[in-house]
Image (cartoon, grey):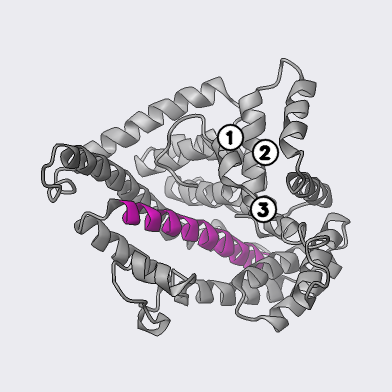
Amino acid sequence: MNFALFMLARGVTINGSVLRPSESRRLINLAAVSAACGDLPAAADAYARLCRIDPADLWNRLIYGQLLLLTSEHAAASDTFHGAIDALLGQTSIDHATDRSARLAGLDAPVDADELPANSMEQLIASIETHLRDGRFALAIELLQEALGNIETLLAAQTGLIVSKARQLRRPTAKFAESLVPLARLGDVLLRMMARAHLAGNLADSLRDRALQVDLALWATSAGSVTRLLEMQYDQLTAAAKAHPSHIEVHYRLGLIARTLNRSEEAEQAFMKVLRLHPHHVGAAARLAATALDLEHHQQVLPVLAVALHVTQDVMARYRGLASAAASSRFDETVEALVRDLGPAADPMAVRANLALALSEMGMLDEQHAEWKNPLTQIVVA
């Protein structure tokens, strides 16, 4: 999650869809336009005002933190990221309708937010374990997807905090990034849980089809079977990476699974390939830093984090243009024309996948275009 890129799409659909936009909507649009035109101070000022209007909106605070970093307000950026991380950890995981909260908690009545555990990750993991134990595998998978998304957000926020703190010192060291390691390891654990949930769910479906009890599906899913599934995915992704070397998502997922299999050197190489293709992929930069610390490759830790967050004006302009194109009714036709114009040397699958990745970074990826990201069926949700 790169908060600066996410910012660029927030105001795209405001003009024309709302006759009299609210002050918040106007500021969101102003910030996106200002950043795409290279006026970062104006974008930062807009988000400062947004944070005063709605201090509970975490996206406003996270975006503001990165804009402060981009305008060299390092102390203020550090304070903003620190506060946002505290809020993220203290926020209940399910902040949608109360009926969804009840369903995900496995209860029959709506849940009062005050009754939920304070720490979102603790709550999510406890709920996941309960659903797995009770055989509610589809709900467990849904919560695992949410938890992995939270990890991505926390990694990005922590990266912002690390870079802003490091910028305030003359000679920062790689130890500044050590807080990324436990977050990355928690992501590895959640990915193994995802694999187990998929295996147990498939086994339960098979037992159910034969009118047999499904209670033992989870316990029949061993650590060895989870590892074999991950190794199969690793082999498939390795082949896909060779066939589609410019496919960013393939390399990223390969890195995620390599870490989960304790193949740190392979994970490091995969994340480095992601960053060669997309230097502002914050998730890959954060996990590369965590992996490099495990391998004691300290020299590349802080530089990759700094580059990932330092989004240039031309990159912002390109993303803003993509957001505008994606909001039009002829987006798919434009993409197909682009693929044709690139000629036979281009990899159409990689082109579409990379566009889908860019849309997901801006929060604009719909179900139809999500299929572009996946060259094969995945258990990894990124």
Q: Nearer the N terminus, badge 3 or badge 1? A: 3
Q: Nearer the N terminus, badge 3 or badge 2? A: 2
Residue bounds of the magenta highlight = 138-167
In this image, 214 relative to 31: left or right?
left
| Residue at the (71%, 16%) spot, across then down | 345
Q: Do the residues labelled 2 and 1 touch (CB within 8 Å)?
A: yes
Magenta segment, principal secondary structure? helix
**Residue 29 percent across, percent down from the top left:** 80, 64
Quadrant the N terminus occupies: bottom right
* Residue on which disc 3 sits: 362
For marks 3 and 1, give the CA distance: 16 Å
| Residue at the (60%, 47%) spot, across then down | 366
Q: In which quarter of the image is residue 111?
A: bottom left
Q: What element carries label 1?
A: helix
| Residue at the (59%, 25%) spot, across then down | 245
* Residue on which disc 1 sits: 372
Q: Quadrant of residue 119?
A: bottom left
